[in-house]
Each structure stands twice: as C-alpha cells, then as structure tokens.
Image (cartoon, rainbow, N blue to C red):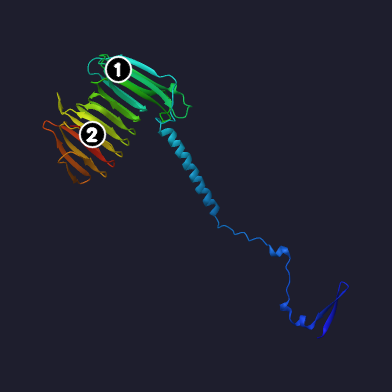
C-alpha cells in the first residue's frame, strides 16, 4: 500500500492510500459549542401577547367591579359602619295612628307594641366605606296637627350622594292598630305584629310581614326583592270588600294565610310557577301568562291578587 507524505507545521504526516479513497469512514469530533446549541426561539403569532394582556385586564376590572358592587349594594351587611350615637324620638298619638315613611337607602322596621298611644322612632345612620359625611343625611319626624299621623322623611343635603354607600336604618314601634305607608328606594321593609291597612313598597329590597293582619285596601310591592307575608286578612270593612295585592317582578312571593281566612285568589305568573295547598285551586295557561284561581271560606270574601313575572308564587293556608 502506497503512502503520501505531507508536511504540516514541521511535522511529517503519513496518509495511506486507503485513507484517501475512503473518506466517509472517518469520524470528526465537533466542538462543544456546536453540540450544545440552544433551541431556536419560536416567534409568537402577531397579536397573541396583546390578546392575553386584554384578557388579564378584563379579569382585573371585573374583580374591581365586583368589590365595588359589594361596597355599594350591601348596606345592611357587616361592612356597614354605624354612627356612634343613635337618635330616638317619642310621640304621643291617638287611636289608630298612621305612620308615613320615605326612606331612600336603609332598612325600615315596624314593630307593634303594647302601648296604645305612643310611637318611638330610632334612627341609625351608617356607611359602608367609613369616609362619607353622615351629617349630610337628615331625618325629620313630624307629627300632624291632629296628632294622629307621623311623617318620617330621610333627606340629603344638596350635593350629597344617595348611593348605597350611606343610609339610615329606622326602627319604629307603634300601637298594634296602626295604618302604615312605607316607601323605600333601596332597602328592605319588615313589619311585625301590626293590624291595619298597609302600603309597603320597595324598588330593590325585601318585604317581610309577620304575625300581622291586613285591612282595607293594602298593597305589598317590590321589583327585585323577596316578598313574604305570614298572617291574616280582613274580608270586609266599612268601605266594602277588602283587596290585597302582592306584586313583584323577579323574586319569589310566599304567602301564608290563616286557615279561617275568607278570600278569592287570583294569581298570575308570566314565566314562574304557582303552587298552593288550597283545595280546589284551578290552573290554566292564559294568553300571556299562567293563572291560578281559588276560593277559601264563606262569603263575603276578600280579593287576594298575586302577580309576578319570573319569581315563583306560593300561597298556602296555615293553622287549624
């Protein structure tokens, strides 16, 4: 086998003919830098990073909005900070007094008492964030000239906000036989152990009447709050047949009447259900809503009208 000699940097190297003719069998060691090259960076599609940024931003804004909603829409929760001093007023009234309340934000509670000629009003101002000036909220309680009507009004000074961040809770005790007219913009209404004609209205609060007797032409109405009545109704009075209306839009209506009540029931619900334990109640699908009709007791009977658009309706009798 022939060989060829070459000189490289003064060193004689011998290369055989076989090495010249079979170059593919030779192996070469690559430098370490070539063996450990980093993976090429993949380029993201245009706009992908901006898309995730916008999604994150939306989530953050939703969280902030949720916290803000809690602060301004739950005034009666544990977040509410009551004013240090409550104010109480007492009035002397005659037989069968009337209480008229206009409260924009806050809970209005009425409780019947054993006193036959005294009304006590306790006001408690509060805020949910602890930074609002509660002196901007004024509560006035005025007795009529004849001494038998008390008007309670919650007013705010010019420029003061009527948001749910501040409000007034009213606790009022009245004689059992008292006529009520209670209006609330954003707040619940609670009545216990009162007998008389009642007009109870709230835009976004619950209405709860317990152990009470309705008389005359009464109406309990709320748009988005729960409506709960537990008591009795009078069929007729000096003005004729009594009519009682229970109205809501979105929330449930639950009515529990004494078994000895005498009434005709007209209930309607556009999308929700109607249920009752009254014997012989009939149901039908009307042109635009579900309807239910029933009669309880002997004539003369009161008229009970129950209406809702979505919330379920439940009308039951209780007791013996």
Q: Is residue 128 left or right of residue 265?
A: right
Gap between marks 1 and 2 measured at Cα: 28 Å
Q: Residue at 50% across / 48% down in the picture?
A: 55
Q: Secondary structure at mark 2?
A: strand
Of callouts 1 and 2, which one flags the residue occurring earlier in the amino acid sequence?
1
Q: Are marks 1 and 2 in contact (CB under 8 Å)?
A: no
Q: Residue at 44% across / 33% down in the picture?
A: 71
Q: Position of residue 317 (x, y in %)?
A: 20, 35
Q: Quadrant of residue 152?
A: top left
Q: Residue at 85% across / 78% down in the picture?
A: 6
Q: Quadrant of residue 111?
A: top left
Q: Position of residue 128 (x, y in %)?
A: 44, 29
Q: Quadrant of residue 315?
A: top left
Q: Quadrant of the C terminus?
A: top left
Nearer to us in this view, 273 or 204: 273
The residue carrying mark 1 is 119
Q: Residue at 35% across / 16% down in the picture?
A: 89
Q: Secondary structure at mark 1?
A: strand
Q: On residue 92, which mark appears?
A: none
The residue carrying mark 2 is 256
Q: Is residue 56 left or right of residue 202?
A: right
Nearer to us in this view, 138 or 308: 308
Q: Quadrant of the N terminus?
A: bottom right
Q: Few, some or many C-alpha atoms within 10 Å of disc 2 (few <14, some 14-19, many ≥20)? A: some
- Up the image or down, 45 lies above or below 21; here it is above
Q: Position of residue 113 (x, y in %)?
A: 28, 19
Q: Nearer the viewer, mark 1 or mark 2?
A: 2
- Up the image or down, 172 lies above or below 284; here it is above
Nearer to us in this view, 178 or 104: 178
């Amino acid at each position: 086998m022939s060989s060829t000699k070459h000189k490289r940097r003064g060193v004689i190297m011998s290369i055989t003919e076989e090495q010249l003719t079979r170059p593919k069998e030779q192996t070469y060691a690559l430098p370490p830098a070539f063996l450990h090259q980093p993976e090429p960076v993949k380029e993201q599609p245009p706009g992908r990073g901006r898309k995730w940024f916008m999604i994150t931003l939306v989530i953050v804004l939703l969280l902030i909005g949720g916290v803000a909603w809690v602060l301004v829409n739950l005034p009666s929760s544990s977040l509410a900070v009551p004013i240090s001093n409550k104010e109480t007023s007492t009035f002397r009234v005659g037989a069968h007094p009337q209480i008229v309340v206009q409260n924009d934000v806050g809970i209005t509670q009425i409780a019947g008492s054993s006193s036959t000629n005294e009304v006590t009003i306790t006001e408690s101002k509060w805020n949910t964030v602890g930074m609002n000036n509660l002196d901007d909220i004024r509560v006035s309680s005025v007795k009529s000239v004849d001494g038998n009507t008390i008007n309670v009004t919650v007013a705010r000074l010019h420029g003061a906000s009527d948001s749910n961040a501040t409000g007034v809770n009213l606790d009022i005790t009245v004689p059992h036989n008292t006529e009520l007219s209670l209006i609330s913009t954003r707040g619940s209404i609670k009545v216990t152990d009162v007998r008389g004609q009642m007009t109870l209205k709230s835009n976004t609060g619950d209405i709860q009447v317990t152990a009470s007797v309705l008389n005359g032409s009464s109406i309990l109405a709320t748009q988005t709050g729960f409506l709960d009545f537990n008591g009795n109704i009078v069929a007729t009075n000096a003005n004729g047949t009594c009519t009682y209306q229970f109205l809501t839009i979105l929330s449930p209506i639950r009515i529990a009447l004494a078994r000895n009540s005498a009434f005709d029931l007209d209930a309607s619900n556009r999308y929700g259900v109607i249920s009752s334990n009254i014997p012989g109640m009939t149901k039908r699908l009307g042109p635009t809503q579900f309807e239910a009709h029933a009669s309880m007791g002997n004539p003369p009977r009161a008229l009970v009208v129950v209406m809702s658009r979505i919330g379920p309706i439940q009308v039951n009798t209780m007791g013996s």
